[in-house]
Amino acid sequence: MECDVLQETRPMNRALKASGWIMIGLGVLILLFLGYQLVGTNFLTARSQDQAQQTIEERFVAAQEDIEVVDTLPPPPVDPGTGTIPPEDEVPVVHYGEPAPEQGEGFGVLTIPKIEGEHVLFEGVDRATLKKGPGHMPWTPLPGQPGNAVISGHRTTYGAPFFDLDQLAPGDQILIETALGTHTYEVRTSFIVSPTAVEVTDPKRGAWLTLTTCNPKFSARERLIISAELVDGPNLAYAQADKVFVPADAS
Amino acid sequence: MRRLFGLLPGPLPARVAIIIVLVAVILVALFFLFEWAGDLLDSGGVVGPGQ
């Protein structure tokens, strides 16, 4: 009788033991996964950032020779409300351009004083480039140029450059240094959209910077968008003129 | 583990080689699994049609 009971419970014990090992295995896998994503990837990005920091100055010096005047515009009206047209002899405002970086190349330094972030910016938003640091969408203007420059970055992995991006409020400054100089932006708005809300990358009059990252933290369900406007830099006057400029053939 | 090792065919060096290949395959598979699952945690923040 006792033997029968033992024989009946033996397969049950084996099944319990096997499921216990499976649970332990899964637990170890999850720990390895979290360790790799939240700690290991940071080392990979830190190495890329260190290497890029060493070469970014060379890029700045080399690109200086190729900085050129792209366009000129008449200066904006003294009072945009009244539409006062400036005198003919006023000096036109100049749009300075810099050479486009290669895909994956470090071309600028992004500094966000409020969240104590300083990161080398790379060209491209593909998976490999974003592992190195924040990436610039190549089909949008470079930071500091008129239009809407878009930069994406990881929120919680690969150095988490945009971990505290939700702390930015209107008025906070974002600085981007490129070969052309330092471009200072001021945050205007922040909002949350779906990952497919491609309209946040649409062109804009003036000079704007759009930062995009995953939201909420530890999830890629939504995107946090920070929209900032250029308030200082080599192309500020041009950007302001561009905002109010009406082409002659548009009337 | 020892029982599994014993089940492998061939002489000892061949078994060791099989184990090394198996471990490498498992590590590569884990890497891709982690990369794929990592996109659920944080995909890089890009906005676009394919996201």
Image (spheres, coloured by chain):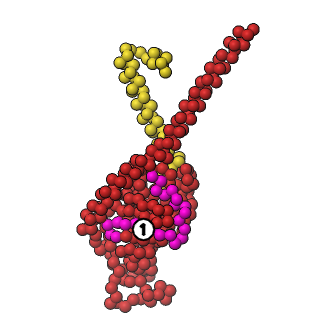
Chain colours: A red, B yellow
Question: Is A178 contained in the magenta span?
Answer: yes
Q: What's the residue at 42%, 68% (across, down)? A: A175
Residue A194 in percent (x, y) is at: 55, 56
Part of the protein shown in magenta: A159-181
Q: What's the residue at 38%, 59% (across, down)? A: A120
In terms of secondary structure, where does tag 1 sit? strand
Give the residue type that dot 1 points to.
Leu
Residue A158 in percent (x, y) is at: 45, 50
Q: What's the residue at 57%, 31% (across, down)? A: A24
Q: From where the camera sits, is residue A203 visible?
A: no
Quarter that holds the C terminus of chain A: bottom left
Chain letter for the residue marked with disc 1 in the picture: A
Q: Where A132 falls versus A112 (above or below)?
A: above
Give the image quarter of residue A245: bottom left
Question: Is A128 contained in the magenta span?
Answer: no
The residue where tag 1 is placed is A175
Q: What's the residue at 34%, 61% (across, down)? A: A107
Residue B13 in percent (x, y) is at: 35, 18
Q: Where A204 falls versus A127 (above or below)?
A: below
Residue B34 in percent (x, y) is at: 48, 40
